[in-house]
């Protein structure tokens, strides 16, 4: 019998090199109720160095806020550990 092993590797992507902020950090803040990008910057200092990461950080934050809204609307998604950001 053939046994299949599915390996899921979830790696963090560094979004802001100046302040060592990953996409997981942004996801965690979005999930914990951070309301807007200015608040995210207050918490993580993302984009407050050279500023080159701001477009990517904004997009990442917007994506995770959208996922949080979807989870809130669908209780099934909130129970899925793969879709829940690591804390
Ligand atoms: S890479 Fe984010 S401020 Fe420089």
Image (cartoon, rainbow, N blue to C red):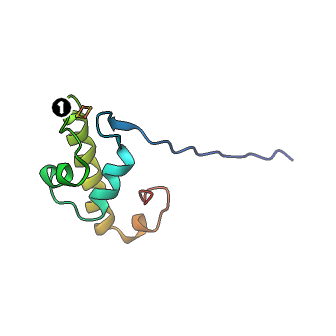
The one of 47 and 24 positioned closer to us in this rendering:
47
Who's the residue at 25% across and 54% down the image?
66
Q: Residues within 10 Å of mark 1 (few under 14, many from 20)?
A: few
Quarter the C terminus occupies: bottom left
Vertical side of 45 occupied by 14: above or below: above
Toward the viewer: 2 or 58?
Answer: 58
Q: Position of residue 14 (x, y in %)?
A: 38, 37
Closer to us: 2 or 86: 86
Residue 17: percent from left, percent from top:
33, 33
Q: Quadrant of residue 85?
A: bottom left
Residue 54, image quadrant: top left
Residue lying at 49% horizontally and 42% vertically, measured from the top left: 11
Q: Position of residue 74 (x, y in %)?
A: 34, 67
| 73 left or right of 4 in image | left
**Ligand 1 occupies quarter:** top left
Q: Is residue 51 above or below residue 20?
A: above
Q: Ligand 1: does it lie within 8 Å of the C-beta at label 1?
A: yes
- The residue shown at (20%, 38%) is 47
Residue at disc 1, secondary structure: loop
Please tell me which residue lies in front, 15 or 4.
15
Question: Where 60 sits versus 73, above or below?
Answer: above
Question: Is 65 on the left-hand or right-hand side of 71?
Answer: left
- Residue most toward the right? 1
Please give the count of numbered marks on the rendered protein: 1
Residue that mark 1 sits on:
51
- Residue pictured at 29% horizontal, 57% vertical: 29
Measured as percent of width and height from the top left, residue 9 is found at: 57, 43
């Amino acid at each position: 019998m053939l046994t299949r092993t599915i390996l899921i590797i979830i790696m963090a992507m560094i979004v802001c090199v100046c302040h060592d902020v990953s996409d997981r950090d942004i996801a965690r803040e979005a999930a914990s109720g951070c309301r807007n990008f200015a608040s995210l910057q207050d918490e993580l200092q993302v984009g407050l160095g050279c500023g080159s990461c701001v477009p990517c950080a904004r997009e990442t934050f917007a994506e995770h806020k959208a996922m949080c809204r979807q989870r809130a609307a669908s209780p099934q998604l909130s129970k899925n550990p793969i879709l829940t950001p690591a804390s």
